[in-house]
Amino acid sequence: MEKGTWEIKKGFAEMFKGGVIMDVTTAEQARIAEQAGAVAVMALERVPADIRKAGGVARMAKISKIKEIMEAVSIPVMAKVRIGHIVEARILEAMGVDFIDESEVLTPADDKYHIDKHNFSVPFVCGARNLGEALRRIAEGAAMIRTKGEAGTGNIVEAVKHMRTVMSEIRRVQGMPFEELATYAKEIQAPVELLQKIKELGRLPVVNFAAGGVATPADAALMMELGADGVFVGSGIFKSKDPEKMARSIVMAVTYWSDPEMLLKVSEDIGEPMDGLEIETLEVKLQERGW
Ligand SMILES: O=C(CO)[C@H](O)[C@H](O)COP(=O)(O)O
């Protein structure tokens, strides 16, 4: 099969729809994620709550760590690179990871430019807080979008804000006559061709997951209710008191997000969720990285 075409990259991301992608830092965590029913894992050095706590520069995970995770599971393995770090991305592509996340959770390598993702065979996912940001990333070649939220806080409010923003901007585009699209494209700094596509499809042209701050099964189901195609969870699982239970319950909640009886059942026995942080108290907002 031809490798690395736009259709293949985009189609691969579509296979994750309705699923949960879990951040993992060890082979052991990757196995927990796979057994819980994650559709993919994201290899990184530390989960966002720990990155936030430790401060300093957060980079691509150690090669040995990523290899260990790739060997431990049969589901796809994603890994993060710093925004604009072309070489970290080339290294991950050479390793054969399945997907790259050009992520604001790591310290940016470039304060102006994101990676030209068309230059890679491996597909990329990128974060966005609004439609303009999502479309700029897609124009650069991202085959999947995730709303940013505020990673590592266990606070769902920013994830909700970003998903609601993207969805309401899509609805606005749907109602716009064609002659207004060019001006709106200029306003949100997005290519007009992509806005035309959105008007046609009534959604983003790639899969859009929610991320950043999911800490309970109810949080995960809320993001599905708001229109997410699936959910990324990191700290919410591995900073909870019982990661195995929490991972399983979050997967169930994403599958049965519209069934309150089922949500009640899967929310009953999850152990203690991670501690949460108020957004107003944060010194660093990861969501502000990238543009
Ligand atoms: O950047 C990500 C998506 O790839 C993180 O996995 C996600 O944002 C995790 O956030 P949290 O730790 O709050 O669940």
Image (tube, rainbow, N blue to C red):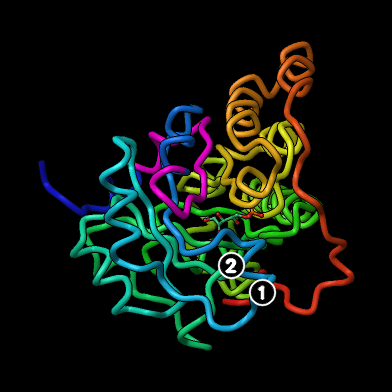
**Foreground: 105 or 230?**
105
Q: What quarter of the picture does the N terminus occupy?
A: top left
Q: Which residue is mark 2?
A: 133
> What is the three-letter code of the residue carrying label 2?
Glu
Residue 258 percent location from the top left of the image: 71, 20
For the question of whether residue 105 can be seen, the reply is: yes
Which element is circle 1 on? helix
Task: Answer with the quarter of the image where residue 102 lies.
Answer: bottom left
Which element is circle 2 on? helix
Specify whether 47 is left or right of 169: left
Q: Is mark 2 within 8 Å of ligand 1?
A: no
Q: What residue sits 45% from the left and 27% below the top?
A: 35
Seen as rendered, the residue at the extreme bottom is 111
Q: What residue sits 77% from the left and 57% below the top?
A: 158
Quadrant of the rendered image holding ligand 1: bottom right
Q: Which residue is mark 1?
A: 187
Q: How many marks?
A: 2
For the question of whether residue 180 can be seen, the reply is: no
Q: Residues within 10 Å of mark 1 (few under 14, many from 20)?
A: few
Separation of residues labelled 1 and 2 (CA atoms)? 12 Å
Residue 203 percent location from the top left of the image: 56, 43
Q: Is residue 105 above or below residue 27?
A: below
Q: Residues within 10 Å of mark 2 (few under 14, many from 20)?
A: many
> What is the three-letter code of the residue carrying label 1?
Glu
**Which segment is the magenta one?**
12-28
Residue 148 percent location from the top left of the image: 63, 59
Q: What quarter of the picture does the C terminus occupy?
A: bottom right
Residue 277 percent location from the top left of the image: 83, 60
Q: What residue sits 61% from the left and 62% below the top?
A: 48
Q: Is residue 72 above or below residue 106?
A: above
Q: Is residue 24 above or below residue 114?
A: above
Specify whether 240 is left or right of 97: right
